[in-house]
Amino acid sequence: MLDQTLAVVLAGGTGTRLKPLTAERAKPAVPFGGKYRIIDFVLANCLHSGLRRVLVLTQYKSHSLQKHLRDGWSIFNPELGEYITPVPPQMRTGERWYQGTADAIYQNLYLVERSEAEAVLILSADHIYRMDYAAMLKAHKAGGADVTVAAMEVPLGAARAFGVMAVDDADRIIGFEEKPAAPKPIPGQPDEALVSMGIYVFSTALLLDELRRDHADEASSHDFGKDILPRLIASRKVMAYRFGGDTGRVTPDRYWRDVGTIDAYYQANMDLLEPVPPLDLYQADWPIRSYQMQTPPARTVPGVSGTEGIFINSIVAGGVVIAGGSVQHSILFPQVFIDDGAFVEDAILFQGVRVGAGARLRRCILDKDVVVPPREQIGYDGKRDRERFTVSEQGIVVVPKGYRFA
């Protein structure tokens, strides 16, 4: 079934809650984990699952995302019918941008039809997880489903932020509510709910019919969760596929995170620093592919004071130099420089950040090419930080790209 499946990755979201990290880039292009971009996870899943026809629907500030796809993901052979193709809005169906998840695919129906695929796998580009889609496609076909929705179990109180499914004993979906005030628990599991991961498998013929019907409905918000799925549940066989139940080839870490806010993004990065990280990046036959610039190895050297540069429980990318500074429980992207006597703790520093001598950084995210002056402090004075920068609900300070201090 894999060679008869078209994967469509929705990558056009503005990522408003992630600003200023999304001020100049699309949310899927935000750096993650010291060397990746967020979109790398869904594309690695496609690669390892054996999917070789992938459309990436871009929209908002997509230049850096398209450059990343070109530099890091030009790995398939078009002459063999394989591709990862970015598709910006083309106004083929009217003078408007994508209006919702369903409308994004509707505006590109001709590409779906031209693929002659039997099934369409619809994915989001802005989640961090590893999943073998081949196992889900196998379950979809074996169960004779018209639609299959990937689902995960979450505590009942957390389910209000998701689309919540009601299922029967065979995991057929019999009800669906988008972000309900009172989520319905899983039968036999009163403290948990089954929620949608925004991953759908459709038979192609059904998808085409439903998208055309949805487009003609002026009252629709053109969203899969709000409009299309609730309508199909009553008349079609719509099944839930439980994430982590049949893991396929991927080790069962069962990790999935929506990194749509600064706090969620920060915590997902910090998760990688746990003694045993909940997200397994080290499965030898399931690497997360990304573009990697050519850099020299990272190194620590003594500073001018003679103090040795050190890092403790940190992720340190290529080209990083810690020259007499101290880095603890932090993530450093390529070409970061930490000067003599500087102290960095619980921080995420993007490519090209320079931290001056004696500066102190704590619980912060510094975007690309920020230059921190000597003896500057970030993360120690909440009032002063809020006067200059974005500060999250949980107190994470975010310094925007290229910021220059007075």
Image (spheres, rainbow, N blue to C red):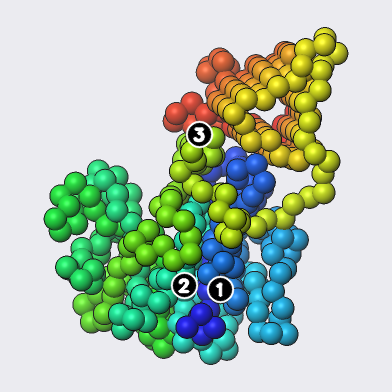
Query: Which mark, by number, is residue 134?
Result: 2
- Marks 2 and 1 close (CB-CB < 8 Å): yes
Query: Which mark, by number, is residue 275?
Result: 3
Q: Residues within 10 Å of mark 3 (few under 14, many from 20)?
A: few
Q: Residue at x 59, y 60 (%)?
A: 285
Along the horizontal axis of the image, is 201 left or right of 279?
left
Q: Residue at x 29, y 53 (%)?
A: 153
- Judged from the image, the secondary structure of the residue bearing numbered disc 3 is loop
- Residue that label 1 marks: 50
The image shows residue 53, relative to residue 398, as above or below, that is: below
Is 208 or 149 nearer to us in this picture?
149
Mark 2 and mark 1: Cα distance apart in space: 7 Å
Q: Amino acid type of disc 3?
A: Pro
Residue 99 visible from this viewpoint: no
Q: Position of residue 92 (x, y in %)?
A: 59, 80
Q: Amino acid type of disc 2?
A: Ala
Along the horizontal axis of the image, is 382 left or right of 193?
right
Q: Position of residue 60 (x, y in %)?
A: 60, 58
Residue 268 visible from this viewpoint: yes
